[in-house]
Image (cartoon, grey):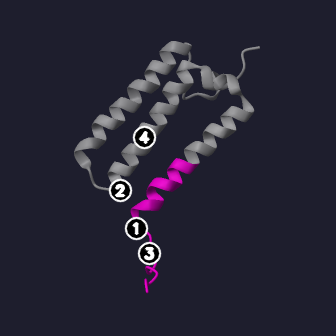
Amino acid sequence: MVEAPTHAALPKWLPLIVVPGALLLAAGAIVALVNPAMLASLSTLMVLTALIQLLDAGMDMVERRWPLIPGVVVFAVLFLFGAARITGAPVWRRAAWRDAS
């Protein structure tokens, strides 16, 4: 007779991956519903990449991977400045996200 395996507790790192991933998916879904044209914009993709890099830097801080943090933050800042250069407006200001019409 085969015994059923006992259920072990979930690893502590699992929610640290699942929760931010779910939040990013939810943010993408909201953007798709509210303004689908934003998904096709190169600058929006660059801002999303920068956001992901900043979240990655936060995870690096939690996991104490100190040597990685400066590179990840520089990468995020470069993407933000690149998005600002493409749009001609600083993407970190609310006016850059308003409709021009």
9, 2: nearer the viewer:
2
Q: Secondary structure at mark 3?
A: loop
Residue at mark 1: 11
Q: Tell us which disc is closer to us: 3 or 4.
A: 3
Is residue 79 toward the left or the right of residue 30 in the image? left
Query: Mark 4 to mark 1: distance in Å?
Result: 24 Å
Query: Mark 1 to mark 2: distance in Å?
Result: 15 Å
Instruction: Identify the disc placed on residue 54.
Output: 4
Instruction: Identify the disc placed on residue 98.
Output: none
88, 35: nearer the viewer:
35
Seen at 45% across and 57% down, the residue is: 16
Across and down, in percent, residue 90 comes to 53, 21
Seen at 64% across and 24% down, the residue is: 38
Residue at mark 2: 62
Query: Mark 4 to mark 2: distance in Å?
Result: 13 Å
Q: Secondary structure at mark 2?
A: helix
Seen at 26% across and 50% down, the residue is: 65
View extreme (left): residue: 67
Residue type at numbered disc 2: Val
Name the image quarter holding residue 72. top left
Q: Is residue 15 above or below residue 76?
A: below
How crowded pointer 4 is (Cα within 10 Å; few <14, some 14-19, many 20+) is rated as some
Please tell me which of labels 4 and 2 falls first in the chain. 4
Highlighted range, magenta: 1-22
Residue 4 magenta-highlighted? yes
How crowded pointer 1 is (Cα within 10 Å; few <14, some 14-19, many 20+) is rated as few
Instruction: Identify the disc placed on residue 9.
Output: 3
